[in-house]
Image (cartoon, coloured by chain):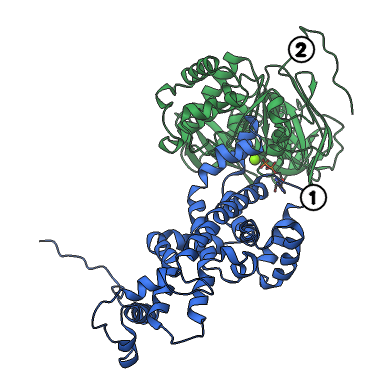
Chain colours: A green, B blue
Amino acid sequence: MQHELPVPHGLVRPGAVSLRGVEIAYGSFRVLDRLDLEVAQSEFLVLLGPSGCGKSTLLNAVAGLTEVDAGEIWVGGRNVTWKEPKDRGIAMVFQSYTLYPRMTVRGNMSFGLQVAGIARAEIQRRVREAAAMLRIEDLLDRKPAELSGGQRQRVAIGRALVREAAVCLFDEPLSNLDAQLRTELRTEIKRLHVRLGATMIFVTHDQIEALTLADRIAVMRDRRIQQLGTPTEIYTRPVSRFVATFVGCPAMGFIAGHLVEGRRFKADGLDLSLDGYQALGEMAAGRPVDLGIRPEHITLAPGHPEAIEAPLELVEPMGSDLLAWVRLGTVSLAMRLPAETPLSLGDRLPVMLPASRFNLFDAASGLRI
Amino acid sequence: MNATVQPSGRRPARLTTGRIGLYAFLPISALFFLTPLYVMMVTSLKTMPEIRSGSILSWPSAHNLDAWVRASSQACTGLSCNGIQTGFWNSVRILVPSVAASIAVGAVTGYTLSFWRARGAKTLFAALMIVAFMPYQVFIYPLVRLFAMAGVGNSLLGIVLVHTIFGLPTMTLLFRNHFAALPMELFKAARVDGAGFWRIFLQIMLPMAVPIAVVAMILQVTGIWNDFLLGLVFTGCRNLPMTVQLNNIVASSQGERLYNVDMAATMLTALVPLCIYFISGRWFVRGIAAGAVKG
Ligand SMILES: Nc1ncnc2c1ncn2[C@@H]1O[C@H](COP(=O)(O)OP(=O)(O)O)[C@@H](O)[C@H]1O
Ligand SMILES: [Mg+2]
């Protein structure tokens, strides 16, 4: 076990979090497998992944609520692997209703500070400030049962804020809210992040939340991080078919086929040039691949020599724009078009698939080529 | 004019066979349980000659409270003849600390088992449950020896300990099930807030466990009040509970059998659980249900 490094005063970064080779198992079932992750001071990191992939476990490990079997956890330059949750300089917001039911909102928010023995005047100041920031001043004397779901989560966030911790952990805090409240509170959390400059680690299975909030996203699957990058990187250059499908709405469309001689892609009734595609490695002819393309990257190009005639099958208006489902070979692909585009079913649309926007994945491994 | 459209299909029958069965069953079972109570009541109000001459179901000719007075303050229990009232106070002195201790210990164990992943918690819980289904007579002899060695045999402390021990499985199960239904994240939030074992228990979990504590109290009050065997074995002769003294009155073999006094004494003894049932029937049913769901 490494000892805490002596950090010169002034160089302490109280919000930097790092996980080094963290392993956690429940019995013989390994949930996290030698996981490394560095989160910078004031960064907003989102852990994104399907349910059951180990996101909460990871967050609980940072908070000290789950013991790690191997590896180290550092917060703000201190090795906190075996420290109590309260001594880690973290605050946490949970998914479900975790307010103390018999205490008022004020009681809920001051509980942790009272435990820490902070002076009454200071507690009052912090509660007042946090309540003002979250616009819950009117609710301070109510019991949790008298609050709506959105108000409860505001209070839960307030309870975390008063700790004035350098690191805030969020475990799907918006999942139990209805759609409108969710977007509202999402914006609020982002605003808090800008204002407080605290490091935030935010767990979600909602890709929209991830894309809108994150400085960086870590996409998790099956006990490990598959891709770590900015929302743009994750969105435009997903490392695997899994990441490509998980992020983006409507989802990326796929065509199954194989590579042929001369940097071309061939599928049933389709033959596309791959000129302009930035490949990671060599593209051996004959290799079976899945070609993915996002709806907004398919364009209409009337009169263009490379345009493909594709019959229109279905139109889904989405308010500001619309989704047009066109048939290419044997598959149906969605393309995003301006809402006012004049379309009628059965039209043959001149469709362009720009190779620079392709995502090629090995059909067997699902990894980017 | 609008023609009223009739809903299609047959109107659901109000009186099904199941209902008829239920309505037949209810009065019969009520009668079954109320008849003995009625017999005891009327017998306790009769004089001995009246009891000897009439039917046990007949209404008393005059309401005579002599038997009740004798039962409470004059009947002989063993050597002394102070009635059953000393037994009443003995029972109260056993009851109060036993109920308090068994609930307190059960609440703490249930809380620990649900939230603090102690090593061997599952094994301990399984063991408790197995023990709960063992006839408790099995433990009496070893416990008597153990208590004698520890110097707490035949004392108030001894019987309180025994009731606490025998109440442990049920009380633990009750509180564990209650706490297990709460979200684990509530506990985690308190941990992040820096609260420790006792603070989380006292300030957060216990206030949420008031309903289940009431249920536990009902179960323990009736159980401990009605106990005969443990009271007889562990209390020693100075603190014998009411049930044991009742037996001494009813089972004493000299002279004529005073049925009216026996009945009055029995009803006096049953008064506490009876009141509990009447006041808190709803809670009691809840307690049974809570104890019955999942292990
Ligand atoms: N206390 C536990 N005991 C056993 N298995 C658990 C426990 N907590 C979580 N798991 C398992 O670990 C995996 C990861 O859980 P979790 O971190 O909660 O996933 P997520 O938050 O991504 O949905 C899941 O398969 C879950 O079933
Ligand atoms: Mg989770």
Q: Is residue A273 left or right of residue B24?
A: right
**Foreground residue among B125 and B97:** B97
Please rate how many residues cluster around mark 1, counting C-alpha atoms within 10 Å: few if below 14, some from 14 to 19, many from 20.
Answer: few
Say which of A82 and A218 sits in front: A82
SS for callout 1? loop
Three-letter residue code for mark 1: Gly
Q: Is mark 1 within 8 Å of ligand 1?
A: yes
Measure the alpha-carbon separation of dots 1 and 2.
37 Å
Amino acid under disc 2? Val
Q: In the visual, does A195 lie left or right of A87?
A: left
Q: Nearer the viewer, residue A251 or A309?
A: A251
> Hey, which residue is sitting farthest left in the picture?
B1
Q: Secondary structure at mark 2?
A: loop
Which residue is tagged 1? Answer: A27
x then y, percent, for residue B217: 50, 56
In this view of the protein, can residue A308 be seen by the observer? no
User: How many residues crowd around disc 2 within 10 Å: few (fewer than 14), some, or many (20 or more)?
Assistant: few
Question: Is A23 above or below relative to A135?
Answer: below
Residue at x 78%, y 9% (from the top left corner) = A11
Reply above or below: B169 against A241.
below
In which chain is the residue bearing label 1? A
Give the quadrant of the C terminus of chain A.
top right
Ligand 1 shows up in the quarter that is: top right
Q: Position of residue B138 (x, y in %)?
A: 71, 72
* Percent x, y of residue A295: 60, 33
In percent of the image, x 21 and y 65: which residue is there?
A: B5
Residue extending furthest toward the right: A1
Left or right, A35 with respect to B1, comes to right
Q: From the viewer's perspective, is B14 left or right of A363?
A: left
